[in-house]
C-alpha cells in the first residue's frame, strides 16, 4: 500500500471517530436533558421529612425523625420505611408523557375538567427546609393506565402513569411497620421469659449472654441472638385496636417476654395471647408489645423457639469462653508429672522450665488453644456438683490453666500472670470424661477425642526431629535375626545364600515373607532422635520394660557383628522409645514401624 493511500485512510478514520464522538456526546446530553425536562417534580427524596396523604377525607401523616419514619395520623405507630421509600422513589422519578399548559382565563374550568382543582386524593411532601410540594391527583386520562396530576400552585397539568394513584390509595396499615419491633437486638441487655412452665432470666455481660434463672450458667450467644432477632423482627399480619378484647386473652397472657433495653428506663413487655379464630390463623397468635399501641397478630414460628426453650437448650456447649489473642501462658498440670508451661514469645511459643527456655513444635500451642476454644460438651452432667469426688474432680487428673502475662506493672494490672480460666479434667471413660471450669459450679462431659488431644507430657510438644537411619545396613550384609517379645520365647532366624530359615528347625514353620518384610524395613528404617533432658528422663521409665528385643547379625568384609535393639513401653501418644544396646541415644519409633518389627514370623 502506498504512503499517500495510508495517510488518506488515516485521515478519514480520524474524522469518522471525531464525528461519532461528537454525535454520541451530543446525543447523551440531549437524552439527559429530555429526561430531566419530563420530570414532574424537582425533589431530593433524602431531604423529605414529612409526608401527608389525603384520600377521600382520610388524612395520613408520616414524619421522619433521626432517620426513622413514624405514623402520626390517623394513629401513632412505627412507619414502614420500605413502603415509604418506595413511594418517595416513585415521586422523585415521576415523569410525564405530556404536559398541558392551561389556557389563560379558562384555568378554573380546565382544572375542574381534569379533576385537579381540589382533588380528593393528594400528596404533600415536606422537606427539612424550603417550601412544601403538593401533588393533586385527578381523573383518568383518555389513555388507558394514565392519570392527570398537577403540582399545586402551577398552571400546568401532567399526564402520568397510574402507579402514583396506586401508591396513594393504599390502606393505612400498608404504611405501618410490619416488623413487630424496631429495637436492635444488640441493645437488649436482659430477657425474662415467663410461661406456664416457669421463668428463664438471661443477662448480657461483657458482650456475652448468661443464664441467671433457674440456674446460673453461660448461654449460647448465637442462639440467644437468633431467638431475640426472631421475636423482634416477627412479621405482623394483622393490626387490631389497642384495647384488647376477651377473646385475645391478653389480660391474662399465656406468656410474657420482658426486655431491658440499653438507654431505656422502662422495660419492653411482649404479651402473648390466644390464637385468632379462622383456619387461616391456626398458626398465629395475638400479641401486644408495649412499644406499640396496637394489638398484633404474628406467626407462632417467631415465638415458639423462645417460649418453648428449656434452660439446657439455651446453654453454651463450649467448654471454655476466652479470646486466644490475650492468652500468654498455658499451663498443663498432670497429677502424675511436673507441670508443663508454654509461654508466648513474640510470634512463637516456648516451653519454660524455671529460667530456661526450650523450643516447641510449630503450631502445637495454637492448635491447643483452637481445640480448647472450639471444644463442646456432649452432656450436662450436674448443675451444682457438691461431691466432685464421684467425677474424679476433687483431685483432677489434668488441669489446664490459661493466663495473660505482663512483665511490668501497669495501671490496669500488676506484673506477672493473670488467670483467665482453668479447666479441670476428672475421670475419663470410653466415650468421654468429666470436666468443669474452676470458677463454675456445674460438671459437663467432654468428648474423648478432645481429651486425648491434650498433651499428657512434653513429647508431642518437642520440635520434630530430623529423621535419621537407625542402622547403616545393606540387605546382603544381614545374616541373622532374633526376635524376643515380652512374655514369649525368642525366635532366631538365619540367612544362607539369600534364603531365610529357622535357626532351630523344631520351633515351627517360618513365614519367609514376613521376615523379608522386617529385613527391608530395618534397612530403610529412620527415626527421630530425642535430646531433650526432660523427655529422656521420661522415656527412661518406659525403657525399663522391654516389649521387644531385636538382635541383628551382620557380616561385612569378613567382620561379624551383632546389634541389639530394645523397644520400651509405648508413650501416652502411642510412640515407642527405642535404644541400641550399649549406646545412650534414644529414639522414637512410630506405631506402624513397631507393628512391622513385632510381626508374626511363624505360621
Image (tube, rainbow, N blue to C red):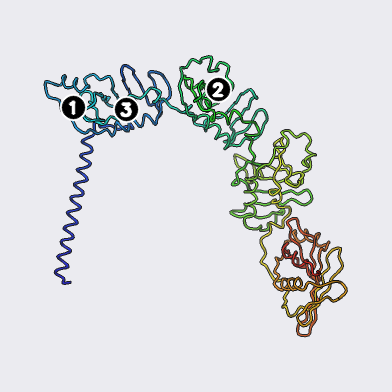
Cα separation between marks 3 and 2: 35 Å
Viewer-side label of 3, 1: 3
In-front residue for pair 72/83: 83
Q: Secondary structure at mark 3?
A: helix
**Would you name the residue on which mark 1 appears?**
156
Mark 3 vs 2, N-terminal side: 3
Q: Residue at coordinates 57% horizontally, 19% vertically from top-left?
A: 253
Q: Residue at coordinates 33% horizontally, 30% vertically from top-left?
A: 87
Disc 2 packing (10 Å; few <14; some 14–19; many ≥20): many
**Would you name the residue on which mark 2 appears?**
272
Quadrant of the rendered structure where residue 202 is?
top right
375 lies left or right of 15: right
Counting every numbered tag in the picture gives: 3
Looking at the picture, how far across and down is residue 187, in whole percent? 52, 31
**Would you name the residue on which mark 3 appears?**
166
Looking at the picture, how far across and down is residue 415, in whole percent? 65, 44
Mark 3 vs 1, N-terminal side: 1
Viewer-side label of 2, 1: 2
In the picture shown, does residue 449 fall above or below 202?
below
Mark 2 vs 1, N-terminal side: 1
201 lies left or right of 262: right
In the picture shown, does residue 23 fall above or below 4?
above
Label 3 with label 1: CB-CB less than 8 Å: no
Disc 3 packing (10 Å; few <14; some 14–19; many ≥20): few
157 lies left or right of 165: left
Which numbered marker is on residue 86? none
Looking at the picture, how far across and down is residue 508, in whole percent? 85, 71
Viewer-side label of 3, 2: 3
Quadrant of the rendered structure where residue 50 is?
top left
The C terminus appears in which quarter of the rendering? bottom right
| Identity of the residue furthest to the bottom in this view | 558
Amino acid at each position: 500500500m502506498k504512503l499517500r493511500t495510508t495517510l488518506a485512510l488515516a485521515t478519514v478514520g480520524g474524522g469518522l471517530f471525531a464525528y461519532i464522538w461528537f454525535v454520541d456526546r451530543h446525543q447523551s446530553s440531549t437524552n439527559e436533558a429530555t429526561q430531566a425536562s419530563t420530570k414532574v417534580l424537582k425533589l431530593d427524596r433524602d431531604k423529605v421529612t414529612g409526608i401527608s396523604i389525603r384520600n377521600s377525607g382520610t388524612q395520613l401523616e408520616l414524619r421522619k425523625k433521626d432517620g426513622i419514619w413514624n405514623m402520626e395520623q390517623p394513629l401513632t405507630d412505627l412507619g414502614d420505611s420500605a413502603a415509604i421509600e418506595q413511594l418517595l422513589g416513585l415521586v422523585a422519578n415521576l415523569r410525564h408523557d405530556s404536559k398541558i399548559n392551561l389556557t389563560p382565563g379558562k384555568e378554573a374550568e380546565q382544572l375542574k375538567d381534569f379533576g385537579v382543582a381540589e382533588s380528593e386524593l393528594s400528596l404533600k411532601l415536606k422537606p427539612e427546609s424550603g417550601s412544601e410540594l403538593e401533588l393533586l391527583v385527578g381523573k383518568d386520562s383518555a389513555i388507558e393506565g394514565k392519570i392527570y396530576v398537577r403540582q399545586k400552585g402551577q398552571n400546568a397539568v401532567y399526564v402520568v402513569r397510574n402507579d402514583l394513584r396506586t401508591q396513594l390509595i393504599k390502606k393505612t396499615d400498608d404504611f405501618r411497620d410490619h416488623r413487630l419491633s424496631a429495637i436492635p437486638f444488640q441493645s437488649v441487655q436482659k430477657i425474662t421469659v415467663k410461661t406456664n412452665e416457669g421463668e428463664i432470666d438471661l443477662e448480657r455481660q461483657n458482650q456475652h449472654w448468661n443464664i441467671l434463672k433457674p440456674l446460673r450458667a453461660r448461654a449460647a450467644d448465637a442462639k440467644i441472638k437468633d431467638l431475640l432477632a426472631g421475636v423482634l423482627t416477627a412479621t405482623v399480619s394483622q393490626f387490631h385496636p389497642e384495647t384488647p378484647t376477651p377473646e385475645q386473652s391478653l389480660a391474662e397472657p399465656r406468656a410474657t417476654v420482658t426486655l431491658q433495653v440499653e438507654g431505656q428506663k422502662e422495660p419492653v413487655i411482649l404479651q402473648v395471647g390466644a390464637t385468632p379464630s379462622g383456619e387461616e390463623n391456626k398458626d398465629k397468635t395475638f400479641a401486644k408489645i408495649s412499644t406499640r399501641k396496637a394489638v398484633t397478630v404474628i406467626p407462632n414460628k417467631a415465638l415458639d423457639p423462645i417460649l418453648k426453650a428449656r434452660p439446657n437448650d439455651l446453654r453454651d456447649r463450649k467448654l471454655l469462653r476466652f479470646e486466644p489473642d490475650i492468652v500468654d501462658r498455658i499451663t498443663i498440670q498432670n497429677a502424675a508429672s511436673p507441670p508443663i508451661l508454654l509461654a508466648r514469645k513474640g510470634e512463637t511459643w516456648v516451653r519454660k522450665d524455671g529460667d530456661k527456655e526450650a523450643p516447641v513444635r510449630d503450631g502445637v500451642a495454637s492448635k491447643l488453644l483452637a481445640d480448647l476454644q472450639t471444644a463442646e460438651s456432649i452432656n450436662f452432667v450436674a448443675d451444682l456438683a457438691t461431691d466432685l469426688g464421684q467425677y474424679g474432680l476433687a483431685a483432677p487428673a489434668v488441669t489446664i490453666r490459661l493466663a495473660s502475662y505482663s512483665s511490668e506493672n501497669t495501671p490496669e494490672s500488676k506484673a506477672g500472670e493473670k488467670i483467665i480460666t482453668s479447666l479441670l479434667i476428672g475421670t475419663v471413660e470410653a466415650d468421654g470424661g468429666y470436666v468443669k471450669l474452676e470458677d463454675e459450679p456445674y460438671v459437663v462431659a467432654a468428648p474423648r477425642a478432645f481429651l486425648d488431644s491434650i498433651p499428657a507430657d512434653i513429647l508431642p510438644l518437642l520440635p520434630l526431629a530430623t529423621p535419621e537411619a537407625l542402622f547403616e545396613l545393606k540387605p546382603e550384609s544381614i545374616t541373622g535375626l532374633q526376635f524376643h517379645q515380652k512374655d514369649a520365647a525368642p525366635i532366631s532366624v538365619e540367612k544362607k545364600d539369600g534364603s531365610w530359615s529357622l535357626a532351630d528347625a523344631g520351633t515351627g514353620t517360618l513365614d519367609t515373607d514376613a521376615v523379608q518384610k522386617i529385613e527391608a524395613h530395618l534397612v530403610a528404617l529412620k527415626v527421630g532422635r530425642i535430646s531433650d533432658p526432660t523427655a529422656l528422663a521420661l522415656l527412661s521409665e518406659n525403657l525399663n520394660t522391654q516389649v521387644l528385643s531385636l538382635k541383628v547379625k551382620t557380616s561385612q568384609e569378613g567382620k561379624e557383628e551383632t546389634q541389639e535393639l530394645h523397644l520400651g513401653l509405648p508413650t501416652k501418644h502411642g510412640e515407642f522409645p527405642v535404644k541400641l544396646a550399649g549406646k545412650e541415644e534414644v529414639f522414637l519409633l512410630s506405631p506402624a514401624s513397631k507393628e512391622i518389627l513385632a510381626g508374626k514370623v511363624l505360621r
